[in-house]
Image (spheres, grey):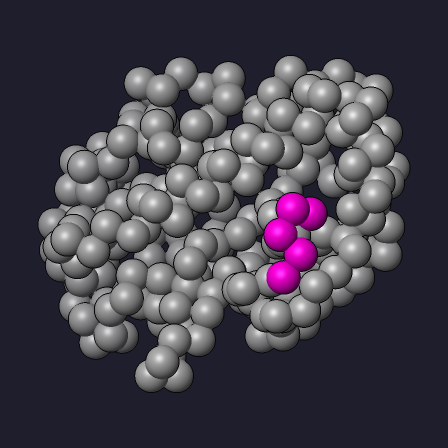
């Protein structure tokens, strides 16, 4: 639960006793194999699910049968936080790696947020940030190079927020292509262009960011849409990777 606790602390001023009470309400932690759906479309539920370990993505299957990834999800992210308000799920969540999750009943969310309003504010902000990510990704006029650079910047900042910057995350070129709305051929070409520009390491099977400032410049990245609580807005565009680089296995 470390990532969830850290995230909630970043979203609002939440006291330790509030966090302890909230965490205690989670149950049925279970493992999800890679490639399986954590959340399926269409069904309603009486509980919400949070990702504890691994990497997942929210997605839809569009008219041509292709997967459209709407956002990537990391430990501490709710897979279906909005289901507390909107019971019918209109998207699915898929495990991109082996994942573990926990669940909390909607009636428990109602009870705990009534008792601790600051916790309710944190959960509300979390939902609004996910909506901001949806809006930011829905900018189809960005050239492919800028779009992919922007997507990589976003992942780095989000990893910083949960304290795992510099970690290797298993995003494949197929995952990135499905998120950016590009063909895999176009995605591969774009990755090669970023390598030639010196922002990604060459001669590596992984996608490794080697020049953060240049990546931010290409992306025209302004991280204020992520609304990271306790992180000054003007620092989001220059957040450091601590020199470790970000590796995204292909």
Residue at the (59%, 33%) spot, across then down: 124
x then y, percent, for residue 47 = 77, 53
Relative to residue 197, is residue 6 drawn left or right? right
Does the stretch in magenta take in 86? yes
On-image quarter of the N terminus: top right
x then y, percent, for residue 168 = 48, 52
Q: Residue furthest bottom?
A: 65
Above or below, 2 relative to 228 = below
x then y, percent, for residue 131 = 45, 43
For residue 179, which quarter of the picture? Answer: bottom left
Residue 34 visible in image: no
Relative to residue 227, is residue 36 drawn left or right? right
Front residue of 118/190: it is 118
On-image quarter of the C terminus: bottom left
The magenta region covers: 84-88
Does the stretch in magenta take in 95? no
Residue at the (27%, 31%) spot, across then down: 222
Above or below, 63 relative to 138 = below
Relative to residue 198, is residue 70 drawn left or right? right
Residue at the (64%, 65%) spot, across then down: 39
Residue at the (32%, 50%) spot, across then down: 137
Characterize the magenta stretch by its predominant secondary structure: loop
For residue 18, which quarter of the picture? Answer: top right
């Amino acid at each position: 639960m470390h990532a969830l606790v850290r995230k909630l602390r970043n979203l609002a001023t939440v006291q330790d006793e509030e966090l302890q009470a909230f965490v205690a309400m989670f149950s049925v932690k279970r493992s999800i194999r890679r490639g399986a759906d954590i959340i399926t479309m269409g069904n309603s539920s009486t509980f919400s699910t949070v990702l504890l370990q691994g990497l997942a993505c929210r997605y839809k299957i569009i008219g041509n049968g292709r997967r459209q990834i709407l956002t990537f999800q990391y430990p501490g992210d709710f897979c279906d936080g909005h289901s507390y308000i909107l019971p019918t799920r209109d998207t699915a969540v898929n495990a991109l790696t082996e994942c573990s999750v926990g669940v909390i009943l909607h009636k428990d969310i109602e009870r705990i947020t009534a008792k601790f309003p600051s916790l309710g504010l944190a959960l509300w902000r979390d939902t609004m940030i996910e909506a901001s990510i949806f809006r930011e990704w829905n900018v189809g006029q960005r050239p492919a190079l800028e779009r992919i650079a922007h997507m990589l910047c976003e992942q780095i900042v989000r990893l910083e927020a949960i304290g795992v910057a510099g970690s290797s995350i298993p995003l494949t070129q197929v995952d990135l292509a499905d998120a950016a709305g590009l063909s895999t051929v176009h995605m591969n070409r774009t990755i090669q262009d970023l390598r030639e520009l010196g922002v990604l390491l060459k001669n590596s099977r992984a996608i490794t960011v080697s020049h953060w400032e240049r990546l931010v410049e290409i992306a025209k990245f302004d991280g204020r849409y992520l609304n990271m609580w306790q992180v000054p807005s003007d620092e989001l565009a220059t957040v450091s990777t601590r020199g470790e680089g970000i590796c995204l296995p292909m």
